[in-house]
Image (cartoon, rainbow, N blue to C red):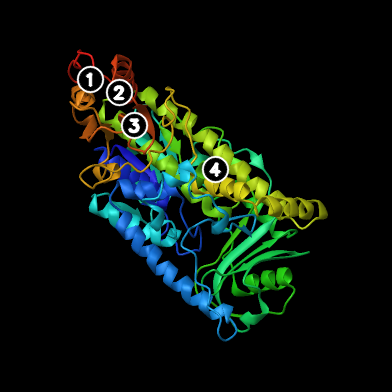
Amino acid sequence: MDVTVVGAGPVGLVLAAELALAGASVQVLERRAEPDEAMKAQGINLPTAEALDRRGLLPAAEQVQREILERRGSFSRMVDDPPTGEVRRTPDTRFTGHFAGMILDPDLVDWSDPDLAAHTAAAGARMVPQRELVALLTEYVTRLGVPVRRGVEVTALEDTGDGVLVGTTAGTVRTGWLVGCDGGHSTVRRLAAIDFPGTDPELTGYQAVVDIADPQKLTNGWAWSPEGAYRYGPQPGRVATVEFDNPSADLSHARLRSRGRTPMAPVTLDEVQSSLRRVSGTDVTLTALRATPTRWTDNTRQAASYRSGRVFLAGDAAHVHPPFGGQGLNLGVGDATNLGWKLGAVVAGWAPEGLLDTYDAERRPLGAWVMDWTRAQIAVLRGDPKSGALRGIMADLLSTRDGTTYAVRKISGVDQRIDLPGDHPLVGRYVPDLRLRDGTRLADHGHAGGFLLLDRTPDGAFARLSAAWGGRASSVTDDPASPTAVLVRPDGVVAWASDTADVAARTGLEAALRRWTGAPSSSPELEPVG
């Protein structure tokens, strides 16, 4: 087996799919016998939606969003109960999110912002909860022939230099590479002796879907009190709480620091009800749980290294933080798409092992940014007077067009950038929507994985140049337009781009192809690009 992935959540499944597309033999080990039904992220950002789009999964994700919107519409009509003659409110389909519980008004967003306007094709697939995303991805990896072995727990590992011996409850597995996508309590991280520094938790939160005997006692949306904050909605029965001073945070942290495999006790109905009563100041009564609830803290940590020899970490195994905005899911999918093609290239033999060093270098800064983004929301969210004053200032800023647009750009992920060689403004960014003369989009040509080269020169000179790299870079030609040519990595990041077709552009493309796809299979064409 070339690669063994530990963890069948969205990160592990995306990684397994990318490896399979790259031609690697891969298996997924998952300690749970059944998919995790706990409530987690309730949506995805644009880079994640575009990752699904590049692999042909956009229609399925859009169907999930349509179903979610229908349920939210029913809930909005139920809770608003407007006076006779008034129009009932329905959910706005322009996904914005919130900052520390302050909902971002879509009417204040400058949707003509160049980055927002350049990433709209996958916008209809952002309201995809983690549970539905896992189901979609599980079906996808099954089609790709990737085995997912459930009920198998990792118990030991040994990096032998030329592979990894993995001890499991089902026996010993020999694999070329091992990737831990097994969450914040990662066994792989612990067994690989990778440190997990960060900041200690101060808050405890819960989220659940429940039946409520007296929902009129709750405020729709976010509400604050001296004890904490809570949210009711946006779908039927969904509640979330944040407690500013709860001793269970110490217990959660102790278990995280112990790095043991003993999970925290399941969240009970009484626990959710008690938390909701404390923060809402009401005697609201919950009668049943309709989904597996989750408990979380603001424990915030990042692995000292994303790699130890032939062992890698991705997703929550590499970084944990508060769940505001579902950033952890999106950050983890970005890890998986980044590592997947690189590890696949090394397994295939056309890339040197040094390529794998770029995984930590590229993903660590984004992980650190997400950690700070969520830490800032905790600072604003607290119930003390200083945080309350800061929340008031932030509320003022987020009531402006510039402030709201800034926050939406950050939450949506459209302005993420990796520091790559090249001075074109697209380099290091996720490729924007690029529509072609035949009515397709560039993303439609990426379903099989691999690099994509868009060539808009009149004679297809860039495409002829890339032909020397065999099937590692697929070429798509189009009518002349700007940009003239774009080389897109399998993770959707622009590796090179040019607005010209001169000798300097040819030299730049050849350098990018050598950097990212290895040595050519034959000599590149030497004539200048016209």
Viewer-side label of 3, 1: 3
Foreground residue, 99 or 310? 99
**Would you place residue 11 above or below residue 482 in this image?**
below
Residue at 77% across, 55% down: 388
Which quadrant of the figure contains the N terminus? top left
Q: Amino acid at mark 3?
A: Pro
Q: Amino acid at mark 1?
A: Pro
**Distance (Cα) linking label 4 and label 2:** 31 Å
Viewer-side label of 4, 2: 2
Mark number displayed over residue 319: 4
The residue at which mark 3 appears reads as 483
Residue at 29% across, 33% down: 481
**Dot placed on the residue nearer the N-terminal end, 1 or 2:** 2
Q: Secondary structure at mark 4?
A: strand
The residue at which mark 1 appears reads as 520
Q: Residue 17: where, in percent of width, then height?
A: 31, 46
Residue at 49% across, 29% down: 361
Mark number displayed over residue 513: 2
Q: Residue 305: where, in percent of width, then height?
A: 52, 32
**Distance (Cα) linking label 4 and label 1:** 37 Å
Badge 4: residue crowd in 10 Å (few <14, some 14–19, many ≥20): many
Tell me if 465 is positioned left or right of 225 in this view: left
Viewer-side label of 1, 2: 2
Viewer-side label of 3, 2: 3
